[in-house]
Image (spheres, grey):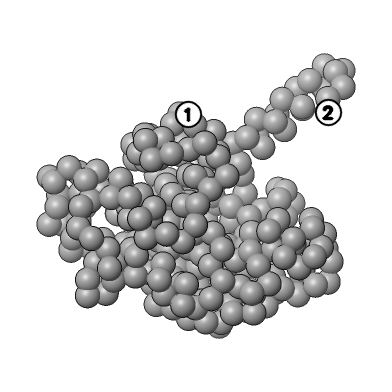
């Protein structure tokens, strides 16, 4: 089986079984980061083209780097856009983590963009995804059922529509985007505020009822542990730039140097 689709299918199975899957987000542009995170043992990687300088060429290189590890690498497009998403899929991303999915109709569009007719509207042209034609038939036969599709819940509107979003066939789970969700609720970074906690719990309950994976962008290691203990399984618990900054400060402070 095509390596990336095989890994994606295993990840989907683990999520359905309720097994915690630990993820890392990549914003720096060196493909070695994907290789390092994958070799370290993260289960899934997010290639963030929404908030970084990563482009299609970088995504392809990172997918190639991650292919030699057990990690599933997923592109994060700038928005719900057919042309952006289909290009990442053709490059070999076995699904996407999509920002600002606010309604059930948008979740349906996301699934449609990632499936071939008659189940969707994706056009055929999986260059690297189908190993440059060497595995074209196999890819066509299994791609639709292999895609890992994860909306990011990051607005009041999305929380209000969460039942419709997680009810869509083809959505594997969701992740909460804590920064944007807190902004939308008018309580930026107040993650212990009752309104924020209530919104996240509403999302969690909907995921449990629909047997979809619940996840979050984890703003600390302690938060990741809390989410795990609550039964969340899609734990986006690391970021390359954050790790680099934190380790730089730790080393300097250990040597008595003040840091900003």
From what the image shows, is residue 242 above or below residue 135?
above
As rendered, which of 86 and 6 lies closer to the eye? 86
Q: Residue at x 43, y 50 (%)?
A: 74
From what the image shows, is residue 219 above or below residue 193?
above
User: Could you tell whether 86 is left or right of 171 in the image?
Assistant: left
Marking on residue 102: none
How far from the left and from the top, in percent, is residue 50?
Answer: 53, 48
Q: Earlier in the sequence, mark 2 or mark 1?
A: 1
Q: Residue at x 64, y 79 (%)?
A: 160
Task: Determine crowd level at label 2: few under 14, some 14-19, many 20+ residues with C-alpha closer than 10 A.
Answer: few
Residue 31 falls in image quadrant: top left
As rendered, which of 168 and 204 lies closer to the eye? 168
User: Could you tell whether 222 is left or right of 13 in the image?
Assistant: right
How far from the left and from the top, in percent, is residue 181?
Answer: 69, 63
SS for tag 1? loop
User: Could you tell whether 65 is left or right of 138 in the image?
Assistant: right
How far from the left and from the top, in percent, is residue 61?
Answer: 36, 34
> Can see residue 171?
yes
SS for tag 2? loop
Task: Determine crowd level at label 1: few under 14, some 14-19, many 20+ residues with C-alpha closer than 10 A.
Answer: some
Q: Quadrant of the C terminus?
A: top right
How far from the left and from the top, in percent, is residue 68?
Answer: 34, 36
Q: Residue at x 28, y 50 (%)?
A: 90
Q: Which residue is mark 1?
A: 30
User: Could you tell whether 69 is left or right of 76 in the image?
Assistant: left
Q: Residue at x 38, y 40 (%)?
A: 56
> Can see residue 144?
no
From what the image shows, is residue 22 above or below residue 186?
above
Q: Which residue is mark 2?
A: 260
Q: Give me the C-alpha separation between circle 2 and circle 1.
A: 25 Å
């Amino acid at each position: 089986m095509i390596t990336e689709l095989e890994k994606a299918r295993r990840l989907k199975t683990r999520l359905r079984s309720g097994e915690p899957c630990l993820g890392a987000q990549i914003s720096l542009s060196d493909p070695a980061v994907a290789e390092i995170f994958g070799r370290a043992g993260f289960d899934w990687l997010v290639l963030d083209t929404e908030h970084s300088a990563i482009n299609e060429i970088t995504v392809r290189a990172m997918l190639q780097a991650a292919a030699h590890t057990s990690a599933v690498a997923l592109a994060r497009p700038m928005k719900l856009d057919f042309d952006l998403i289909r290009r990442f899929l053709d490059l070999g991303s076995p699904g996407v983590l999509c920002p600002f999915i606010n309604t059930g109709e948008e979740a349906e569009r996301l699934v449609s963009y990632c499936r071939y007719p008659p189940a969707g509207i994706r056009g055929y042209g999986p260059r690297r995804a189908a190993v440059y034609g060497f595995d074209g038939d196999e890819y066509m036969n299994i791609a639709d059922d292999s895609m890992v599709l994860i909306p990011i819940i990051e607005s009041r509107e999305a929380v209000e529509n969460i039942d419709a979003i997680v009810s869509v066939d083809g959505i594997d789970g969701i992740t909460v985007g804590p920064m944007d969700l807190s902004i939308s609720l008018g309580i930026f970074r107040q993650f212990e505020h009752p309104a924020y906690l209530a919104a996240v719990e509403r999302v969690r309950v909907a995921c449990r009822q629909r047997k979809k994976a619940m996840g979050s962008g984890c703003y600390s290691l302690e938060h990741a542990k809390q989410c795990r203990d609550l039964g969340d399984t899609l734990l986006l618990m690391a970021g390359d730039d954050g790790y680099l900054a934190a380790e730089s400060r730790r080393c300097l402070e250990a040597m008595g140097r003040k840091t900003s």
